[in-house]
Image: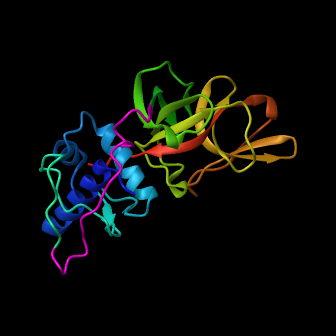
Amino acid sequence: MLTRKQNELLLFIHKRIKETGVSPSFDEMKGALQLASKSGVHRLITALEERGFIRRLAHRARALEVLKLPESAVPDTPEQAPDAPAPESDAGSNVVRGVFDTSADQTGPETVEVPLLGRIAAGVPISAIQHETDRLPVASGMLGQGEHFALEVKGDSMIEAGILDGDTVLIRRCQSAESGEIVVALVDDEEATLKRLRKKGGSVALEAANPEYETRIFGPDRVKVQGKLVGLLRQYH
């Protein structure tokens, strides 16, 4: 079951793609749904993607594809008043009137604020994680238990893991991780980098997800795990 806002956004994206062949920008979606910030659009898009209604196409700007419309979709658009009654569906339409859960809108209280701690290198390491620069509202369902923080990705070494330059990664703070997990690693207490952790005997390898970058191998005392990847936010222009 979709929330009303999820339904409005899905129909708005569907309508815009049919009319122009291009998915709307985040600014257009924010304005159409009368949201206060683009982070609300992020949450709605993530929810629709998780439910299989849309798909984000990698390496393309403003690349959203509508995979399906719900059988019980309300055929009103975001330009209509939220409480306006939806018109009856046409006999040949695959969009019919339905009832939606308005108590769990992604723009409601089911969000937590996560501190943004600056940039993290996904290529050549940069200075250690900075102090908090902002706070981001994130759907609580993306996080789970524990303490979390966010970092803006700088670089292209993790592109084959679906992490692009400019993405925002959500990190669960921890001091250990299993081999194969993507982590924020602090090297020699000076450089922070986002890499896949590999444990090889008494050594620790930080592995990129881009063949243009070499795997770096360190002694276990040189690498400290700061947290592991639990989610990702991406803005489409």
Q: Is the magenta stretch mostly helix, strand or loop?
A: loop
- The percent coordinates of residue 156 (x first, y second) are 48, 48
Vertical placement of residue 140 versus 18, above or below:
above
Q: Is residue 44 visible?
A: yes
Q: What residue span does the magenta drawing correspond to?
A: 90-111
Q: Which of 32 and 209 is in front in this view?
A: 32
In magenta stretch: residue 98: yes
Quadrant for residue 165, please give it.
Answer: top left
Q: In this view, does 206 lie to the left or right of 138?
A: right
Q: Can residue 23 be seen in this view?
A: no
Q: Which of 138 and 87 is in front in this view?
A: 87
- The percent coordinates of residue 45 (x first, y second) are 36, 51
Quadrant where the N terminus lies? Answer: bottom left
* Residue found at x 17% / y 69%: 18
* Residue found at x 39% / y 46%: 234
- The percent coordinates of residue 90 (x first, y second) are 15, 75
Quadrant for residue 43, please give it.
Answer: top left
* Residue found at x 45% / y 49%: 164
Q: Which of 153 and 36 is in front in this view?
A: 36
Q: Return the residue found at the far bottom.
A: 92
Quadrant for residue 230, please give it.
Answer: top right
In this figure, which colouring scheme has been used for the structure? rainbow
* Residue found at x 75% / y 45%: 178
- The percent coordinates of residue 160 (x first, y second) are 53, 58
Q: Return the residue found at the far top.
A: 131
In magenta stretch: residue 199: no
Number of numbered discs visible in the structure rendering:
0
Q: Which of 168 and 126 is in front in this view?
A: 168
Q: Is residue 55 left or right of residue 226?
A: left
